[in-house]
Image: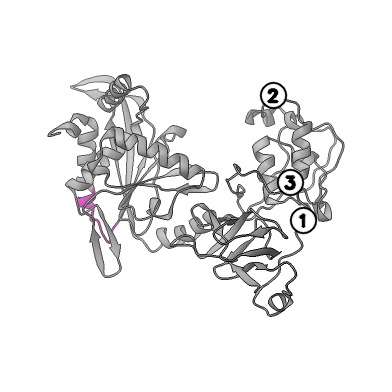
Amino acid sequence: MATNVVMPKLSPTMEEGQLARWLKKEGDKVSMGEPLAEIDTDKATMEMQALSNGVLRKILINEGESAPLGQPIAIIGEPDEDISALLNSGQAKAAPAAEPESAPEPAQAKEPEQPEPAAAEPVTPPPAEAKSQPAQPSRDGGRQLISPIAARMAAEAGLNLSSLQGSGPGGRIVKRDIEAAMTEKPAGKMAASPLAALRRPAEKGAVYGPSAYRDEPVSEMRRTIAKRLVTSLGPVPHFFLTSEIDMERAKDLRSAINELNPELKLSVNDVIIKVAAAALIAHPQVNASFQDNTVRHYEHADIGVAVATDNGLITPVVRSADLKSLEEIASEVRELAGRARARKLKPEEYTGASFSISNLGMFGIDEFTAVINPPEGAILAVGAMAPKAVVRDGAVAVRQTMRVTMSCDHRVIDGAIGAQFLQTFKQIMENPLYLFLGS
């Protein structure tokens, strides 16, 4: 008997899913429990399994399109079975005709299409990436028509979209067009420097109209980030505390540990996580979250570590960081971050933190404020470690310093409590041997 395949709930906070990739095509045989498609949830890309045996008779939504939980997205039935009742009953809404793409992407291509902001974006990279063919890009009222998969492939390959002619419906650039362009691209050609645009001469006498642009579907992760930010910065009463920390001893500790164990590759952020965990245990009022009618206090420090991905930030959680060694934290963070970027985290690995850390120091950011991730009570924003002239014992000296800013939920943390936590954090960071006392 033919049955609908509906959009499943694959994470606790999922409200709708985006079809990243069909693993079967219409006419393929499927078995119960066999992977049928890859779904982008709000945090990860997860496989959806078939719940019945038969043949994939009809695909109802295309790759890159979204559907709410419970909406039919495909039909499975017997090869010769009449499925018109399901198609016409209103239970299943057929998607627009699929563009004539080539076969599904290889199994290793697990990452979702890279999202773009809703604002208009230029589509003409520096001329160093321009292709020689005279073809004109497909346009629709100034828009360049391109499928999400093709857009991601082009971005990864550094292709100039303005030089491509789409072969899809209405001149849409599809996957096979990118594959053909990649075959023609000279081997070993490097992506142009961002500064190349500054050297691009304007065409003499040219008259330029509004810039062409392209739209890509917003990923479920980016859509969820937008929703959560709206429900965080407004309703949550934030206040901010900033402190400057002498990092000389922490830097020396990191260097000494890496010298003893070069394979560990301990980072400053790993030390920050461990120190934050120790400070949270010392100040349990900060290791807490607001729960409508109660304030929940946690026995251990479950620290969310912000990781940048192509789709936005995700915070894999280091559970009970207060009980783990620096070596254990370093290994776990590296492993979690790798799977976060590959969108392979399980829901329980990125939810339920009691405190979060966001570090933008590697981008040269000296200081910033971060938005609290509800229902957590605080988040620590970490800036760059850099040499600075400071006064020590009445003399000017050059020291490695770092600025941190803690965003606090005033419903959970009072100003004095937050200041005491930050004072303890600073004390341990400046004297990290405290971490080894009693061990």
Residue where numbered disc 1 is placed? 99
Task: Indicate the secondary structure of the residue bearing disc 3.
Answer: helix
Residue 72 at x, y percent in the picture:
62, 70
**What amino acid is labelled 1 in the image?**
Glu
Task: Indicate the secondary structure of the residue bearing disc 1.
Answer: loop
Q: Quadrant of residue 362?
A: top left
Residue 279 at x, y percent in the picture:
21, 43
Residue 144 visible to an observer of this rendering:
no
Quick one: label 3 or label 1, which is nearer the N terminus?
A: 1
190 sits to left or right of 329: right
Of residue 223 and residue 176, the one placed in the foreground of this image is 176
Residue 288 at x, y percent in the picture:
25, 56
Give the residue furthest to the left: 438
Distance between mark 2 and mark 3 Cα atoms: 22 Å
64 sits to left or right of 243: right
Residue where numbered disc 2 is placed? 188
Disc 2 crowd rating (10 Å Cα; few below 14, some 14-19, many 20+) is few
Residue 94 at x, y percent in the picture:
71, 69
Of the 4 image quadrants, the one containing the N terminus is bottom right
164 sits to left or right of 40: right
Query: What residue range appears in magenta?
Result: 408-418
Would you place residue 295 above or below residue 159 in this image?
below
**What amino acid is labelled 3 in the image?**
Lys
**What amino acid is labelled 2 in the image?**
Gly
Q: Which mark is residue 407?
A: none
Distance between mark 1 and mark 2 Cα atoms: 31 Å
Would you place residue 348 above or below residue 276 in this image?
below
Query: Is residue 2 one of those drawn in magenta?
Result: no
Query: Is residue 415 one of those drawn in magenta?
Result: yes
Would you place residue 434 above or below residue 55 in this image?
above
Residue where numbered disc 3 is placed? 175
Residue 424 visible to an observer of this rendering:
yes
